[in-house]
Image: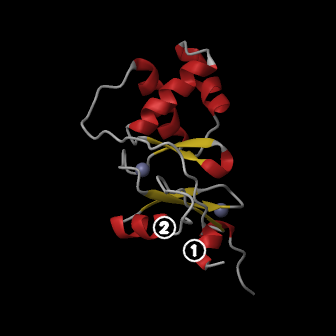
Amino acid sequence: MSAAGLLCYIIAMTATHHHHHPSKLSRNQSEILACLRKAKEPMSAYAILDRVRKSGISHPPTVYRALNDLMEKGMVHRLQSRSAFIACGHGACDGKFAFAICRDCGKVVEISLSDDDQTALLALAPEEIAPEQVTLEIAGLCAACTPARA
Ligand SMILES: [Zn+2]
Ligand SMILES: [Zn+2]
């Protein structure tokens, strides 16, 4: 298996459409986005629900719907490996991104992928799967969690 193959896994999913024209966020979307931006770390849908409950959002489907809309806008991304959501590190992006995650403290850094990166990753898909989307998450240790060498 190639190094790229080890580091990433490709999940073919229904194509997601990213809209770039700025559109107004609904109240629920704004609340949830603000919550994720404040947290600066990945949160599960239930952790989000806990935080936004005080603003009157009390049903999981409401949270999921708002998260889906925010993901379509490129303002929130899903960390597949942790079933968690995180605010886009750049405000919003076009869906070409990867994540590096510290396996110790959980720090997440968003990496922007170039068109060439994206194309090369999608090209790893075997012939029987027509690639639509790539999910790349690199696990490792951040500087703070790397033990000092004696
Ligand atoms: Zn992003
Ligand atoms: Zn760390």
In the rendered image, residue 22, in percent from the top left (x then y), is placed at 26, 34
Figure quadrant of residue 107: bottom right
Q: Residues within 10 Å of mark 2 (few under 14, many from 20)?
A: many
C-alpha distance separating marks 1 and 2? 8 Å
Q: Secondary structure at mark 1?
A: helix
| Amino acid at circle 2 | Leu
In the rendered image, residue 31, in percent from the top left (x then y), is placed at 46, 25
Q: Which mark is residue 4?
A: 1
Counting residues from the start of the chain, the first of labels 1 and 2 encountered is 1
At horizontal 58% and vertical 53% (from top left) the residue drawn is: 11
At horizontal 59% and vertical 20% (from top left) the residue drawn is: 61
Q: Residues within 10 Å of mark 1 (few under 14, many from 20)?
A: few
Callout 1 touching callout 2 (CB < 8 Å): yes
Which quadrant of the rendered structure holds the C terminus? bottom right
Figure quadrant of residue 104: bottom right
Q: Which residue is mark 2?
A: 121
At horizontal 55% and vertical 40% (from top left) the residue drawn is: 39
Side (left or right) of 41 relative to 122: right
Which quadrant of the rendered structure holds the N terminus? bottom right
| Amino acid at circle 1 | Ala
Q: Secondary structure at mark 2?
A: helix
In the rendered image, residue 70, in percent from the top left (x then y), is placed at 43, 34
Q: Nearer the viewer, residue 90 or 71?
A: 71
In the rendered image, residue 80, in percent from the top left (x then y), is placed at 62, 49
Side (left or right) of 46 relative to 69: right
- Return the residue found at the far top: 56
User: Is residue 34 among the parts visible in the rendering?
Assistant: no
Q: Quadrant of ligand 2?
A: bottom right
Residue 32 higher or lower than 86, as above or below: above
- Return the residue found at the far bottom: 150
